[in-house]
Each structure stands twice: as C-alpha cells, then as structure tokens.
Image (cartoon, grey):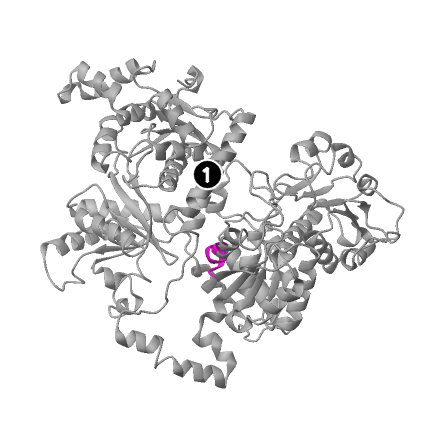
Amino acid sequence: MGTPPSPERRGPFPFCPLRIKASMVNDSKRNLEREALLFHSTGRPGKIEIHPTKPLATQRDLSLAYSPGVAAPCLEIARDPSTAYDYTAKGNLVAVISNGTAVLGLGDLGALAGKPVMEGKAVLFKAFADVDGIDLEVDTRDVEEFINCVRYLGPSFGGINLEDIKAPECFIIESRLRELMDIPVFHDDQHGTAIIATAGFLNALDLTGRKISDVRLVVNGAGAAAIACVELVKAVGLPHENVILCDSKGVVHRGRTDLNQWKSAHAQDTPLRTLEEALAGADAFFGLSVKGAVTPAMVAVMAPRPIIFAMANPDPEITPEDVRSVRQDAIMATGRSDYPNQINNVLGFPYIFRGALDVRARTINDEMKIAAAKAIAALAREDVPDEVAAAYAGRRLRYGPDYIIPVPFDPRLIAAIPPAVAEAAMRSGVARRPIIDMESYRRELSARLDPTAASLQALAAEVQTRPQRVVFAEGEEEKMIRAALAFRNAGYGTPILIGREERIRETITSLGLGTTLDGLEIQNAKLSYHTKHYTDFMYRRLQRRGSLYRDVQRMVNQDRNVFAACMVALEDADAMVTGTTRHFHSCLNDVLRVVDPTPNELVFSVTLMIARGRTVFIADTNVHEAPTAEELADIATQAAALARRMGHEPRVALLSYSTFGAPVGRTPDRSRQAVAILEERRVTFEFEGEIGAHVALDPELLSLYPFCRLSGPANVLIMPGLHSANISSKLLQKMGGATAIGPILMGLSRPCQIVPMDATVSDILHMATVAAAEAGR
C-alpha cells in the first residue's frame, strides 16, 4: 500500500510539492504518450470534422444548397468575385499547410506524420478565434513544387497559415507566395514567435526604464523564428547595429563566408566571435536555439536588469532557477507554461488572422504584426479581470517582471488584438472591406466565443497553483487509474486511489503506464489505519437511522464510496470523484450518508452542454424528480451562480411545454410560481418563465413577446422535472453531437462529484479538476 499521509497532513493542510524522480518522469511521459494516442484514435479518428451551417433536411433545402438553387450565387460570384465572401465560407476559412520538414521539435517527419499537428493548429484557430481551419499536407520537399501547389488555392481560402517548414526553404516559400497570392500568407513559426516575443520585449524595456534605441540585444539561433524576431524588433525601433546574431558556429559577422542571404542581412562588423563574448554587457538575450546554450556565468556578466527570453522548447537555453542563482534583477521569459511569461504563439496567430479576415486583407504586413505586438503588450499593462486572476492565484498577475505577457486564456485577447490588426490593415491600405464602427466590432468579437473553454482552462490553472488531494473512489478501475495518473502528471495534486495495491499495480503495468507509484497514494479500506476513526464517525451519524455498529463497519470496509467520502468529510482528502461502476443515485446515496448539504442550499446537478461554440446549463439533470416551485427557484439561483463563475452572464429560462399561458397545465403553474418567488427575492440575474425551450433559445421567437425579460437567448435552462432534464441532456449528447461537462453536483458542504457510468478518462479528469477547484476556494 502507498505511504499514508503523515499526521500533519490531516485537516486543512498546505500542499507539499511532489518529489520528482526520474522513474516518475519516465512514467509520466509514457502515460502522456499513451493517452495522446488514445485521445486521437478513440471514436472518430483525428480532431476535426465538418458540419453544415444550413439545414439540409428537406428536398427544398437540397435544391437551395445544391442544384438548381446554387447556380444563383455561382453567377453572382462570376459577375463580381468579391461576393465570394458573401455567399461562401471563404472569408472565415484558413488553410493550415505544411510539408512536414520541421514538425515541432521532431525534425523532418514528412507530410503525413505532420498531419496531427496541422489538425491541432486548425482546432486552435477555431477554439480561440472562431476561424475555420482546414489542414493540407503537401507531400514534397521541392520548393517550386510546394509553391505551385499552394498558389492555386487562393479561391478556396481567406488566408494561408504555413506551418512546420524548415529553414531556409520557409523564407523562400513565404516570400514567393506573398507575391503570388492576394490573400494573407503567414508562416507562424517565424512571425508568431516574433510577435509575442516583441510584445514581451516592449514591456520588459518599459519595466527596466530602457529606450529601445539604446538597447544591445544578442540573439542565439538563426533559424526562421530567430530571423523573424530580429526583423520585427528592428521594425519597432531597435537599431541594426545593436543586434548581434549567433548561430551554431558563433557570431554572425561580416567576415564569414558561410552565410546565406537571410543571415548575412543581419551580419555585423564586430570583433566578437562567441556567444559568451557577445553576452558580456548585453542588455537583452533572445534564445531560439537549444537547451543549455547559456550558462549562469554568461548571465552574470550581462548589463544590470538583463532581459532574458530563453525560448528553446521543450527546455530553455537556461532555466529561470539558474538565472536567479546569479541575478535577482533579471526579467525572464521562456516557451514553457510552467514558468511565468510564456512566449506562446496561441496569443497571436488566431487573432491576427481574425482581424485580417474581417477586413479581407490582401496580406499580413509589418504594420499589422507590429500592431498585434503592441496590442498584446498593452493588454498586459491593464488590470487583470477577476476570472483570469482567480485561475492563477499562486502567481501575482499584475504588470511587472513576472507578468509582461498576457496568459493564453485571457478572454480579453479576442477583443484586443483583431481590432488592432484590422486598423493597421486599413491604415496600410491592404484592407478590402474597412470596418466603420470599431466599438461594435469589439463587442461582436467579445460575444463571438463561448467563454466555457476559457473557464475550464482557468479552473485547471487554478488547481495547478493550489494543488489538492483528490480521492478516485473506484481506484481499481482502468479509467479511474488513467484519470488519476493524468491528474498527477498535470500537476493538479495527489490522486488517492481506493483499492488493492497489487491490483492497481497490475493494471498500471498491463496498460504500459510504467511501474512507479510515485505521486500516487493508495488506500485499502480493509488495511487502512483510518478505518476505526471513519467507522466511529459514521456510527454517530447513522446510529439513530437504523444502523448497528457492525453495519457501519461493513459499510466503511466494503463500500469504496463511503470510505472515500469519509476521507473528504474528515479532511484527510480535499475532494472525491466516483461513478463509473454504479448508477448516479446509488453513488449519491452513499455520499449523502457521509457528507451534509451546504446550509440553505439545495443538492442537485447541472450539466453543461456545449454545441457549435455555445453553452447552455441544464438543471436539474439527476436529483429531483418533480421539484416544487420553491426548489425550482433555488435551482435557478444556484445554477445562475455557477454560470457566472464560468464566465457567462446568466439568462435563466424556467422551461415548460407552455409559453406564457398557452397551453395551461399543472407543470407550467410550478414554473410560473417559481418566477414569482424569484421576483420576491430580487435576484441579480435575468429570468423568465414559463417558457418553451424553442422560444427561450431563439431570438426571433423571443421578439414576439416584447414583455419578456430576457435580453437574449437563455443560457441557463431550468427544467420542470427530472425526466425532461435527463432525457434532453442525453439526447443532445448522443444525437445532437453536443459535448457534455458534468453533471456537476451542487450544494454539498464538501466537494464530491459523480460522473456517468459511460464517462471517458477525460470526463473523469474534468470532474476531478472541478472538485479540486471547489476545494481550493
């Protein structure tokens, strides 16, 4: 059995960081690789699919979408090609194109092996900026063949995102395609890194009181990203002579005869020959090279308050810890998410294309890239909103040395960067459709994305800063074990598996997930020294409810849910998750034997349904069969609070088959009474009822009722009974293709979550994260 917690860990204990051993690192890597393979292969293979945006259910629909109706837009486009943006998806479509010659840090894997990365990039476009990305893998290493393949794709797409093409070919390909095509062509490996690094650089200069014209910068690495960084910082004002570029052979100087045209453009007439010599007295360093290229001794001789961006991935040129060992005054950035100031391309490319597409730009020029960098820099100087700050409670998200770049899931990014890019496109004359009302455009952008994804990521970041001890009650089940390992590997805290150690070890080994249990804790109820304490606790609770001491003893020894709930109730653990082997109600009954409801709150569940970038909160999906009017009002109030915590401004609809009295019935009466109760309580969210689901979700139908209090489609749906809530949520998931998060159990005094029996490993991990976040508050 794993090592039990020490006595000081009992009660509200601080988290003790895990001891990271080599075996644990190797196991974590194997676990991640296996989970990634399962993630990509489970269900429909890959990460993307295509959904129609128009109904195609009837013969009339088909006749409009295809022959004969489709002839009308074809003729309009033939007459005026610009109308392709009005009648097709061209204006929101970006091709993610690669030949796979520089895939991540893996090298030349070829076009086919690069496809998972390109699909992933397409997903990021959609998730962060609502841009539809289509991946295209071109199976050639010949520059001319690649150019000729891509150049003829202009009619299909609004933009081209080149990806993972090795240098120097990437320079030639991008330059030629920009000349040949009248849509934006952008090589993100170059310019994405350059834009984010420049944003951070501008803020670092501000914090250290430097003028860009006086700064001496050393750049190590002379590939695509490094050259782009040098060119962009020069474009924002850094003098040419103030930049020393180094490659694997040392300083790029004018005396060298082995330089290509891109390196030679940045060669200097200097006696410096090595990186070490170049760094002496330097104000700033950009690393886009390899792990360990910079030593603490090199940092020690840099100028006061040095700026060090060590951006090699996965391991930087020098770690922040090594920098701090010799310099306390440095401002540091890396490419890693586990350190402050991550240079992350996702801050750039989705939003840059969003702005470029929205003005139908012919290209993405330096003015647009500079505008993006300055917008990112400016956002970091603003006050951080509560929902973002809460996710990073272990860090101080306030403009300063440890916060010079916004975090990737900041919901303000989409309203800050695309307008800046669009305005720069208009000023520089490459926009074909100017935006007249920028304020309306910003509001439209803010409403374009569902905040749920950002909120879930914020929860994960929150747990990473305040790791928790979470019990996975069904600890011998394969899915629970995999979720527990993923929880550990993500840095969320210590997973506790309830079960027999030998069985858990066998399962981990058979799954190929390693052999070490480092970072895991195993509790066997029959062997645990806690069992007597838990039995006494349970007997005090149940002795007047028909249970003998031996009944309670058997319960604690044999029921994993009861044992896990006792751990949480008595603060030997922070939260629990269960549900894969028993029905929801059986699990809930077990938990309620041990954990009390929160005073003045109702215990019920909310399921988040996410479809087509839109989230609705459905309640109560699991607990109350026929809630009273008072209970419906309570459910509405608590569900609205959850929606607000998840970044949504709640618009609550108390649903029925009736809309405002037509037709009449007893079920609509309860919804109407609940509305009256909410009116008396003077709640601070929008609500309306009784109302049909079709009306609550359709703004056109809502407009038929001018007295309706909802300012837009409802996003919190309070069902009149368990049957309607449960059936509708399951139908949406199985037939409608919606993604379900939950059910999230509300109203318990200690964090306990119950997943459905068909939950995936990801579902279990999500709910464990939700429970851990609740525990950390």
Horizontal relation, residue 626 to residue 374: left or right: left
Q: Residue 391 versus residue 138: which sits nearer the camera?
A: 138
Residue 721 in sight from this viewpoint? no
Which residue is the extreme one toward the bottom? Answer: 79
As drawn, 599 above or below 123 = above
234 or 515: nearer the viewer: 515
Residue at coordinates 80% horizontally, 36% vertically from top-left?
Answer: 301
Residue 378 occupies quadrant: bottom right
Quadrant occupied by the N terminus: top left
Residue 423, image x, y percentages: 59, 68
Work out whether residue 384 can be spotted. yes
Residue drawn at the location 82% of the way across and 40% of the way down: 280
Q: Residues within 10 Å of mark 1 (few under 14, many from 20)?
A: some
Q: Where is residue 340 in the image (x, y as percent from the top left)?
A: 59, 40
Q: Main secondary structure of the magenta part?
A: helix
Asked if 673 appears above or below 301 in the picture, the reply is below
Residue 525 position, x and y percent, is: 30, 19
Q: Quadrant of residue 450?
A: bottom left
| Residue 78, percent from left and from top | 48, 84
Q: In this view, does 643 lie to the left or right of 548?
A: right
Amino acid carrying mark 1 in the image:
Arg
Q: Give the range drawn in magenta.
A: 123-131
Question: Residue at left 32%, top 28%?
Answer: 473
Q: Is residue 548 above or below residue 300?
A: above
Residue 124 lies in the magenta stretch: yes
Task: Looking at this view, name the residue that lies furthest to the left.
Answer: 665
Q: Is mark 1 on a helix, strand or loop?
A: helix
Residue under circle 1? Answer: 34
Query: Residue 571 magenta-drawn?
Result: no
Residue 602 placement, left or right of 610: left
Whether residue 215 sits left or right of residue 450 in the image: it is: right
